[in-house]
Amino acid sequence: MDTPDPTLDLETGPAYDIERIRADFPILGRLVHGHPLAYLDNAATSQKPYSVIQAVDAYYREINANVHRGAHELSIRATEAYEEAREVVADHIGAPSASEVIFVRGATEAINLVAWTWGAAHVAEGDEILLTKMEHHSNLVPWQILAGRAGATVRYVDVEADGTLVMDDYDRLLSDRTCLVAVTHVSNTLGVVNPVAEIAQKAREADAICVVDGAQAAPHMQLDVQAIGCDFYAFSGHKMLAPTGIGALWGRREILEHMPPWQGGGEMISEVRLEGFTAAQLPHKFEAGTPNIAGAIGFAEAIRYLQRIGLERVHAWESDLTAYALERLDAVDGLEVFGPRKDRVGVISFRYADIHAHDLATILDQKGVAIRAGHHCNQPLMTHLGVDATARASVYLYNTRSEIDALVDALGLAAKLFGVA
Ligand code: 7TS
C-alpha cells in the first residue's frame, strides 16, 4: 500500500528542501509554552510525517483484518500489505531475503528474542558474552539475565575518554570462551559510530556470533547487514519516522533456522497436536500472535519516505547541523560536550556548569526546546564518565540551525537563573 506523499516531490533534486520536509511533519507546526517547538529529542523517538500517519489511517479505514488466516478480501489485502512491508524492510537493510526479517516491537524485543532463543540454546556455563561499556540497557540486561541463568560471564570492552571503543581491549577480551559479542552501532549517549564491520569480522574469526544494536544507526545511515557481516541486526521503527511498537530483527537464515521458537501461540506453528507442535517456517516461527499490522505498514512507509529523500542527503544535512551545534555549544563557557568530534551522529550529550541535567531540560522546555536529561538507559556508561546524568540534544532530518540557536539561547536563560558566570 503506497500512500502518495502530499508534499514531497519524488524529483526533489539535489537541494535539501528543509522547508518542504518540515511541512511533512504536522507536529513541527505546534507551539510549546507559547514558543515554536524545537524538537531535539530524536534519539528517544522521532516525529512522524503525514505519509506515515496516512498509511496507518488508510490501513484501518480500508483493509483492516487479521493476517495469514482469512480467505476474505480484507484479510488477503492486509496480509499482502504486511508481507510487502517486510520486503521493504529487508531491501532497505540489504537482507538477502525477507524471510530473515522478523517483525518485533522494537530493538529491545529483538535483542531479547536472540537472548531467549539462540542464547538459551547455546550459552553454557563458563562461556563469555562480550559487550561494551556503552551499551543501552536493552543490549545489556538481557545478556546479564541470560548469563545469570546459564552460569556464563559478561565482559565489557572499555571506552576511551572521547567515547570511542578501546579496540585493543576488544582484541584482548575476545577469546575462545567468547560465544557472543553484542555491540551498539551508534551510541545513544555519545553519538559515536562504532566499527561494527571490524567487530563482526573478529567475532567470526573467534567463532562467536555478533549481534548489532542498530537502534540509533538505522534512522541516520544507509545500512547493509551483509557488508557489516554481523549475525543479527536489531532496530526500532519509532526512531526512524515509523509508529511506536514496531521494529525488526534481521538474522542469518542458517542461524534462525536452527533457533528454537521463542513465544508460543498462533501464527508460529505449522501444526499442533496434543503431544506437541511443529514450528512454522521463517519468519513466522518467531511471530507468535496477531502482529502489529498497522505498525508494519507505517514502518514501510517511513522507510519509503527516507528513501525518497535519500539517506545520504539526510546524513549530509545532519552532519552539517551537528558540526554547527558542536561549534555553538563549545563556545558556551562552562559547557562540556561528551563524545568524539568526528565519526559521530547528532546525538550530543553535555553538562553545563553545575546545573543538573533535569533542571536544564525543564528550563529549556519552557522555551519550547525539547531535549532529554538523565542516564539515557546507559547507567554503566554514566558511571564511566563520572556523571549521574547528562543533558542530551539529538537532531534528525527536519531540524534546523535556528533550532540549535534556540537551544543555545535557552541555555543562556538557564545560566541566568542559576547564576552561572
Ligand atoms: N538500543 C539503543 C542504542 C537505544 O538507543 C535504544 C532506545 C534501544 C536500544 C531501545 O529501543 P526501544 O525502541 O526498544 O526502546 N534509546 C532511547 C534513548 O536513548 N532515549 O529513549 C530511548
Image (spheres, grey):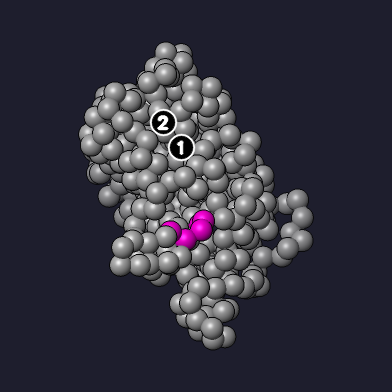
Dot 1 or dot 2: first in sequence order is: 2
- Is 72 or 365 nearer to us in this picture? 72
Q: Image point 71% across, 65% down: which residue?
A: 9
Disc 1 element: strand
Whether ligand 1 has any atom under 8 Å from the Cβ at mark 2 is answered as no
List the single residue furthest toward the front: 275
Quick check: is 281 in the magenta stretch? yes
Tell me residue 390's x, y (percent).
Answer: 31, 36
Identify the magenta region: 279-283
Q: Image point 43% across, 59% down: which residue?
A: 279
Question: Circle 2 is placed at which residue position?
Answer: 180
Q: Which amino acid does label 2 sit on?
A: Leu
Question: Circle 1 is placed at which residue position?
Answer: 211
Residue 223 quadrant: top right
Q: Which amino acid does label 1 sit on?
A: Val
Image height of 37 relative to 227, above or below: below
Residue 337 as seen in the image, left or right of residue 125 = right
Q: Image point 30% across, 46% down: which residue?
A: 361
Q: Main secondary structure of the magenta part?
A: loop
Quick check: is 214 in the magenta stretch? no
Tell me residue 88's x, y (percent).
Answer: 62, 59
**Mark 1 residue crowding within 10 angstroms, few (<14) / some (14–19) / many (20+):** many
Image height of 115 relative to 92, above or below: above
Residue 145 as seen in the image, left or right of residue 111 = left
Looking at the image, do the residues carrying marks 1 and 2 touch, with CB atoms under 8 Å apart? yes
